Amino acid sequence: MNINNIKLSVIGLGYVGLPLAVEFGKYMPIIGFDINQNRIKDLKSNIDNTLELSEEEIIESNGLSFTSNIDNLKECNTYIVTVPTPIDKANLPDLSPLKSACHSIGKILKKNDVVIFESTVYPGTTEEICVPILEESSKLVFNKDFYAGYSPERINPGDKVHTIANIKKITSGSTPEITEFVDQIYSIIVKAGTYKVDSIKVAEAAKVIENTQRDLNIALMNELSLIFNKLEINTQEVLKAAGTKWNFLNFQPGLVGGHCIGVDPYYLTYKAQEVGYEPEIILAGRKLNDSMADNIANRFLNAVKASASKEACDLNILVMGMTFKENCPDIRNSKVIDLIYHLKKYSNSIDIYDPWVQSSDIKNLKQEFSFVNAPERNKYDGIIIAVAHENFINLGISKIRSFGNDKYIIFDVKYCFSQEETDLRL
């Protein structure tokens, strides 16, 4: 495969695929494909409802075109797959979007084509799951008629600093020649450099442990915060003191959601169990992080009930923020939603305020929860700042305090304000 003859496409135009396609579109013709026709319609009008890219950024990508018709990719010879890889209700890998993408690509795959995967998976997925589907759908032979590569995505939604061009890219291929080809492709757009590895499995494993490591570090901080709360010690003061040592890692306690940190460890543990190893530390961290929403809710309710001298069912509660992270509209796997469900078991009046959330994303939740465009003054017995949106920080603690009644409690989960300005923190 000659880099000069590349005809590129990106399959899946979400938080990962769209920024990637836009970046490539600055340097070459590229087709962005997504099965969501409304998404394609918006993108053709230069509208990105994930808010990752502005209208101007999409327009600047001169070589990029969009389609929801897989047949329009027949002239392509290189396909980059960036579809979601979520987990199901049992915390098992859900590879259905990935398998579907492979079936679609297989129908148009030609001799010498290359399929590069970016979706986060467990080690072995590309060659053990994806390649057989491509072979079956195309009737071509792997590493003879077509080839595969893997270059894990490292997108951080909402982050305008660590963008594709500024993050080192791991590259791999199914043969040494394809590894070099994949590396050359990404070198066009990634100014931070690339890192070639010896096999696709190494690249898959490297990706899945990045977020597993982060998950475990946050789990440790969460457990420490639970212990220090029992001991009536200020967790933040402890972490600041420990942080004066050069090799102390700066992690913070909090809710761990989204489609990366709260998901990727389950892909690794699934594969470990499949080969006969029962993970202990990884699953213990996941269990603790998944329990934090309930811990926060219980601590908050106890404090509010004591302050307001009311039964929980009579409390008026305001939850500020619903997305899985700050300055991002994504509510997928948001642990704030778990927090709200727990509060709802005990309180009949919960208002949710999040200017980042779009109505189309919460249409299935509107019947269950009350969403407000602006909180009422002097109404709430308890206020939880659950997400560190810039909107909330810019609003200021005085304005947020005005939403509370005369006996209100503020729980600042995300350390938006100082200890002196709030009542509860992790």
Image: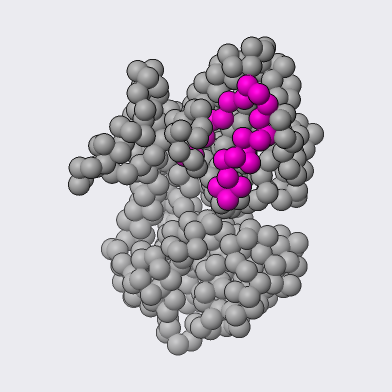
Q: Is residue 276 visible?
A: no
Spot occupied by residue 231 in the image (x, y as percentages of width and height): 35, 18
Q: For the view shown, which residue lies furthest in the bottom direction?
A: 4
The structure residue drawn at horizontal position 75% and vertical position 67%, both measured from the top left corner, is 41
Q: Nearer the viewer, residue 298 or 207?
A: 298
Q: Is residue 323 visible?
A: yes
Q: Quadrant of the N terminus?
A: bottom left
- The region drawn magenta spans 393-415
**Residue 297, above or below 116:** above
Q: Nearer the viewer, residue 354 or 117?
A: 354
Task: Please check the rendered image and state whether residue 394 is part of the magenta-colored stretch, yes or no.
Answer: yes
Is 83 on the left or on the right of 403, as rendered?
left
Q: For the view shown, which residue lies furthest in the right direction?
A: 367
The structure residue drawn at horizontal position 20% and vertical position 47%, both measured from the top left corner, is 246
Q: Nearer the viewer, residue 220 or 13?
A: 220
The structure residue drawn at horizontal position 74% and vertical position 72%, both measured from the top left corner, is 45
Spot occupied by residue 173 in the image (x, y as percentages of width and height): 37, 67
Task: Please check the rendered image and state whether residue 63 is part of the magenta-colored stretch, yes or no.
Answer: no
Spot occupied by residue 30 in the image (x, y as percentages of width and height): 58, 78
**Residue 230, above or below 261:** above
Spot occupied by residue 214 in the image (x, y as percentages of width and height): 37, 44
Is 75 on the left or on the right of 265, as rendered?
right
Q: In which quadrant of the rendered view does residue 340 lie?
A: top right
Is 86 on the left or on the right of 220, as rendered?
right
Q: In which quadrant of the rendered view does residue 66 lie?
A: bottom right
Q: Quadrant of the C terminus?
A: top left
**Residue 54, above or below 243:** below
